[in-house]
Image (cartoon, rainbow, N blue to C red):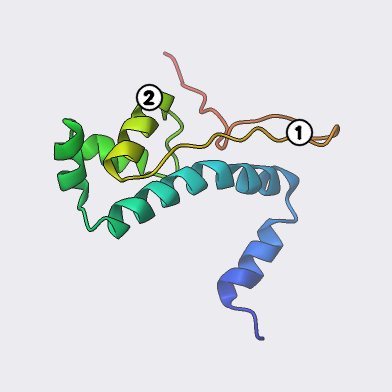
Amino acid sequence: MKKTNFERYLQEQLKDEDFARRFHSAGEAWDVALQLAALRNEAGLSQKQLARKLKTSQQQISRLESPGYEGHSLSMLRRVARALNARVKVVFEPQPPDATPHLAETPLKYRTR
């Protein structure tokens, strides 16, 4: 099968070690976001409707479904799961000895005057 332009571009970018590390670690945040959005859609709810059920804001639901968001609390995930007739399952997996722990995104450096 012929590769798309994006696939060729991604393959080239993955040669950069820093990019590859950030790309692979971002998968964890994407996984949570995509699962939440999929469950909500499966339930036939908009973000606003789910927010109403949880007595929170649509913006909070949007934040939870954002791949860049890493502030998920276990209690909020449980509330969302109950509202969507699901359960939360956290799995810890051993890391290879040579892997370094990191966040999905490199922290930004703030300029001061």
Residue lying at 21% horizontally and 43% vertically, measured from the top left: 50
Q: Which residue is mark 1?
A: 94
Q: Position of residue 25 (x, y in %)?
A: 62, 42
Element class at badge 1: loop
Mark 1 or mark 2, earlier in chain: 2
| Residue 11, image x, y percentages | 69, 64
Check the image and name the residue furthest to the right: 97
Q: Please, what is the three-letter code of the amino acid marked with disc 1?
A: Pro
State the image coordinates of residue 52 (x, y, percent, origin top left): 14, 38
Residue occupying the point 26% across, 34% down: 60
Q: Mark 1, residues whose alpha carbon is within 10 Å: few (<14), some, or many (≥20)?
A: few
Q: Residue furthest bottom?
A: 1
Look at the picture and state if 33 lies above or below 1. above
- State the SS at label 2: helix
Q: Toward the viewer: 45 or 110? A: 45
**The disc labelled 2 sits on which kind of residue?**
Ser
Where is residue 81? Give x, y as percent.
Answer: 35, 39
- Residue 53 vs residue 69, the one in the foreground: 53
Residue at position x 65%, y 71% from top?
Answer: 8
Quadrant containing the N terminus is bottom right
Q: Quadrant of residue 73?
A: top left
Q: Residues within 10 Å of mark 2 (few under 14, many from 20)?
A: few
Q: Quadrant of the C terminus?
A: top left
Q: Residue at x 27, y 40 (%)?
A: 83
- Horizontal arrangement in the rendering, residue 87 relative to residue 10 (left or right): left
Residue 5 picture quarter: bottom right
Residue 75: assigned label: 2
